[in-house]
Image (tube, rainbow, N blue to C red):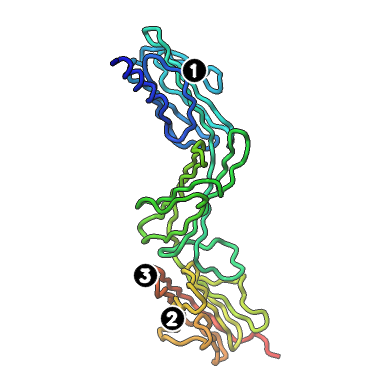
Amino acid sequence: MRNKILILIATLALLAPISIFAMTIGPSTGGSIIFDISPQNPGTNTEVVVKADTYSDDIDRCKVSWYLNGKLEVEGIGRKNFSFKTGAAGKLMTVKMIIQTLEGAQIERSFSVNPGDIDLIWQADTYVPPFYKGKALATTGSKVKVIAIPNFVSANGVKIQAGDIIYKWKNKNGNLSSGHGMNSITTEMPIPVIDNEITVEASDLQGNITATKTLKLKSANPRILVYEDLPLTGTEWSRASWSAVNLVGEESTLRVEPYFFSNPTSSADKNLNITWTLNGKTFSPNENSDRVAIFRNELGQEVTSNLEISVTNLKKAYQSAKGIFTIKSQPKLFKF
């Protein structure tokens, strides 16, 4: 009776799934094989290391054979480690291990891996001006949307759609959310000293394909740039100023653009406070917009001034920036 119980336990151990892989269990006599597979969720074209052990036999003294897709790859005494490289998405790979024990028994086990890939892209809900060709960066306190783009192909070559996959999202603090077809999540950037680390685990409905991907986001700093507004052509978006501004004429208009501050929740939501200071004196800019100020050169000669612009997000404690500019204003060189 005791022998029957031991055989039953060994059989149940063999039938237990290993991590996320679809398993094909071969016959086993006299013991069971334990696999340690790294990485647990291998993607496409990924090096996989398999370490094997057995409860009942000293594997270091046994003859071990490793097969990949039916082809003998490695054989020898105590060869308990095996490595292989996965292929493209949907390319099923079967690994089989056979142990010949000292007593002449054979222990055999196999498993299959169908690799899948997943990419993560992100979008920060922060402000950039029109015609800006770069990416809106994430800053402390800003919202970020992370989107998973899986590349899953079933064993029979059918591509699995993103909406037919189960997603589990988490960060350093634990689980965020999970669900069928939930291929995106919106989160908030933490305080400056902490990176935002988002991990998603995606698997098909049968659990045969699983992929894991982690995205690490660092908070950028908000910044301030100024542009000149011209009467006829409007804002000179191609000419941004970081520190020095050259103005020509008796009257010039400057526009400040606060990059990477969180967007307001609505058009009526005034979330930014903008302060203009010229030569140490704070002044009110254009009455219609605190992003625009008019400068006049009434002396008719070259004038150098110091301009300081401070921007603070009233609803985000860590979002602020200051710009210091040297303004050189000169009258028109030619008068008609």
Q: Which quadrant: the N terminus?
A: top left
Helix, strand or loop for disc 2: strand
The amino acid type found where label 2 is placed reads Thr
In the image, is residue 269 above or below residue 178? below
Q: Which residue is drawn at 45% across and 63% down?
A: 143
The residue that disc 3 covers is 317
In the image, is residue 283 above or below residue 169? below
The residue that disc 1 covers is 74
Q: In the image as oriented, which residue stretches furthest toward the right? A: 336
- Earlier-in-chain disc, 1 versus 2: 1
Q: Which residue is drawn at 50% across and 65% down?
A: 125
- Earlier-in-chain disc, 3 versus 2: 2
What x and y, as percent, mark residue 156? 62, 33
Residues at marks 1 and 2, CA–CA distance in whole angstroms: 72 Å
Residues at marks 3 and 1, CA–CA distance in whole angstroms: 60 Å
Helix, strand or loop for disc 3: loop
Q: In the image as oriented, which residue stretches furthest toward the left? A: 2
Instruction: Give the number of the disc on residue 275.
Output: 2
What x and y, as percent, mark residue 191? 36, 61
